[in-house]
Image (cartoon, rainbow, N blue to C red):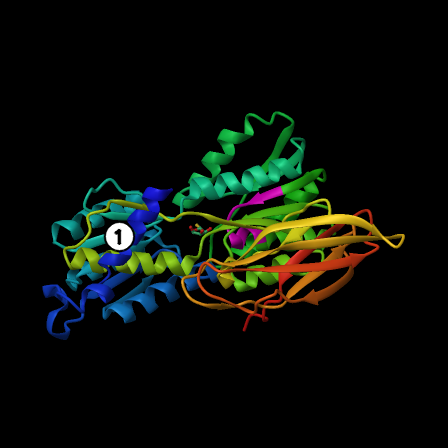
Amino acid sequence: MKALKLLLSLLALTALTSVAAQTVPPAFAGGKQPTVALVRQLCTGDFFSQWLNGAQTEAKAIGMKLVTYCANGDDAKMASDMQIAITQKVDAIIIDHGRDATMAPVVDKATKAGIKVVTFDLTTTDPAVVQIAQNDFLIGLDVTMKMLSDLNGTGEIGLVYVGGFDPLDKRKAVFDAVRKFYPNVKLDGTWGTVSSNTVGEVESQTSAALLAHPDIKAILAPYDAFALGAMNAVSRQGKDVQVYGCDISTADIQAMIAAGSHWVATAATNPANIGRVAVRASASLIAGGIAVNRLEDVVSTVRLYDLVGLGAAPSAALGLELRDVKSVRRLVDGARVVVIEGLVANVADSERAVPTLRARLIGSDGANISEWTFDTEQKRLPPGGTTRFETTAKNPPREGRLSIEFVVPAAS
Ligand code: SR1
């Protein structure tokens, strides 16, 4: 973990923003703006737009021209987009997803033409390529273990999966490895689609799966578009099925914290950060800087805990984390009270305003019993800073759960 952090910091240090003031590499000298082609396999959905945002912001900050291509899932188009970028003699190409079978020949062509290549979520064998990923093994493990532990090791489950996508294959590999140690967890079915309408298609497939397997208790849907589709199907049928997803965005948070939401846990990194790292890697390669071959972002898991009384809301998108959240039940003047306390930490690299927190008591039917808001001791936090909160609920129900979440502004 430490080594990875070091690699990431080294990469950050070699970024042109910090180098520029001292020695400007020839590729950037005299106001030259290298051109980077971003060749994308998929472009719809929050994950990919946040990723693109990060890449664009970083390219602007460094002073590079970013030319974007989108294949909309068409592998042949992706290879031909690569070919166009090679013909245009760009300085670097960043490949976002894709399949090795179609990309390997054009990656080879690009590197032979002296073009620097960075991949995200695409494993290649070419040692000249810098490969970036989110550590999907950890992401897969985290969300799989959460589901298995919630099931107490017993129950029928479904899996949303489509093969041929690096991150999904890695998450599934972990699921397969772990599952064999849980013989009382029965996988009733695997379904899934990746398309320009992933959410809608997964919703229909999940509806059919739930009708065919009415005893499914949990669905592992390790991509936010899968989780949204699965969640919609569960809600429509009014079933008591929990959805375990991956990724996070403001819209995902809204979906997770909506009253009665069935999406109970997610594991994620910040996609904008990965986009920035990919652009920095390409800049460093152009400048003749780094020779790191693989970078795996350290996973930061965000969960909605389904505890005996306490929950924590996702917060990675805010750069804030809920920590050490505890609840203590007491009798005060004959009344049952539960005192909830914890910390909010700023895990971003700049100052953050701490939003108001909301506590919700949720009944076993998923409906809100009551909710209230409260504030932390400090309202602004420097990077790495923490602040305390404490709030009390009187006469909480014995059944159901309590969720603590940030009051996040509605997605625009
Ligand atoms: C179709 S692959 C989708 C996944 O790619 C990225 O790694 C995201 O995490 C998303 O879950």
Q: Nearer the viewer, residue 26 or 36?
A: 26
31, above or below 213, in the image: below
Left or right of residue 291, residue 313 in this image = right
At which x and y percent is residue 277? 32, 57
Q: Nearer the viewer, residue 195 or 185?
A: 185
Q: Is residue 46 shown in magenta?
A: no
Q: Residue at x 74, y 52 (%)?
A: 238
Residue 37, horizontal then vertical, whole percent: 25, 62
Frontmost residue, 277 versus 230: 277
Circle 1 Cα neighbour tier, 10 Å, few/some/many (<14 / 14–19 / ≥20): few
* Ligand 1 lies under 8 Å from the Cβ of mark 1: no
Report x, y in % for residue 127: 20, 42
> Is 223 contained in the magenta span?
yes
Q: Is residue 107 above or below residue 89?
A: above
- Whether residue 80 appears in this view of the structure is no
Which element carries disc 1, helix, strand or loop? Answer: helix
Left or right of residue 254, residue 271 in this image: left
Count of marks, rendered view: 1
Vertical placement of residue 269 versus 35, above or below:
above
Residue at 62% across / 57% down in the picture?
256
Residue at the limit of the structure toward the front, as seen here: 333
User: To which quarter of the image does residue 184 belong?
Assistant: top right
Quadrant where the image shows the N terminus: top left
The residue beneath circle 1 is: 10
Q: Amino acid at mark 1?
A: Leu
Q: Is residue 67 left or right of residue 158?
A: left
- The picture places residue 197, in percent across and down from the top left corner, at 51, 58
Instruction: Write the start and end of the magenta stretch as one range.
Output: 219-227
Quadrant including the C terminus: bottom right
- Asked if residue 26 can be seen in this view, the reply is yes
